[in-house]
Image: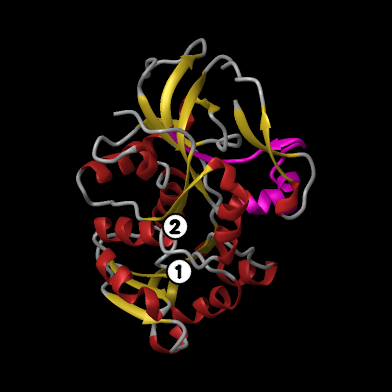
Amino acid sequence: MKAVVINEYGNNDVLNLVDAEIPHPAAHEILVKVYAAGVNPVDWRIRSGAGKRFGLTLPIPLGSEIAGTIEKLGEGVTGFKVGDAVYGKIRTGGFAEYAIAHVDDLAHKPQRINFVQAAAIPLAALTAWQAMFDLGKLTQDQRILITGASGGVGSLAVQLAKAKGAYVIGTASGNNENFVKQLGVDEFVDYTRYNFAEVIKDVDVVFDTVGGETYQNAFQTLKPGGYLVTAVDFPTEAQFAAYGENLARVFCKSDPEDLAAISALVDSNQLIPHIATVLPLVDIKHALDLSETRRTRGKIVLQIANQPD
């Protein structure tokens, strides 16, 4: 099978598209025939050196978000059968024709969407879900600010927050205003024209998907007792001391119950994935280049194989 592997850390020159053996699922594991794989910032961060911090050991097969069909079940797997259409977040190895997933990494693919669309959801939606609802404690009628609302994570976060019944404020560039408004935001702020921290105040929750100066400015928008969760930056000790449990860095984790709830929202048409571009596996370098610009509208997806009828 074809797979993307790195043998050292660095830029895209370290990416290798190799022929590898099809893996065999161990107990409580599932072998998935991958039709599509989502591209995420974590992929180029691992490539650039974060793999060691994540506990990975070189050589590392890349890719953490897949959609496909079950090829083989490991011992002890229940709730799935060979041939089932599934999707999910895996630790690594998704940029390949076949991938291994733990049974808790997967859920049945929503019926309303195809495999390419499904590959745009699991990691991004789980990140948004866990950031806003688990760490940010977002509830109905609260005000939430989502930075980078046009991106792969932000565009899903807007829809999830609206499904919760929150009042949603989204930031993006003016080029993406219509797109973000179509996602359902109650307020849109063009960060290229305004310092959003000067025009947005008293929000209950901030979900930051941008980092840097945007993350730093976001503190100014919080009401007393509000929560700030970032998917990008690493809060300082001083910030943790000042905000305590109301400040968090989200680290996406597999959760079959969360993913099943997300699937239900997809099938009820309350959550729609938006695809920026679809590329073949051989274009992995271009895909990571696009992701690293952080200027895409929606999600980058690799199509690994032709989708079944």
From the viewer's perspective, is residue 203 above or below residue 244? below
| Placement of 27 over or under 175, stated as above or below | above
Q: Which residues are magenta?
A: 44-67
Which residue was labeled with disc 2? 153
User: Is disc 1 placed on a helix, strand or loop?
Assistant: loop
Question: Is the N terminus in the top left, top right, bottom left or bottom right quadrant?
Answer: top right
Circle on res. 235: none
- Amino acid type of the residue tagged 1 in the rendering: Gly
Where residue 303 appears, as percent x and y from the top left, is 46, 40
* Circle 1 residue: 148
Q: Residue at x 74, y 51 (%)?
A: 13
The residue tagged with tag 2: helix, strand or loop?
Answer: helix
Residue at horizontal 69%, vertical 67%?
237
65 in the magenta segment: yes
Residue at x 35%, y 55% (from the top left corner): 274
| Image coords of residue 28 (percent x, y) | 52, 18
Q: Earlier in the sequence, mark 2 or mark 1?
A: 1
x then y, percent, for residue 158: 34, 62
Above or below 130: residue 225: below
- Alpha carbon distance from label 2 to label 1: 8 Å
How far across and how far down the image is residue 95, in percent?
57, 38
Q: Is residue 289 left or right of residue 201?
A: right
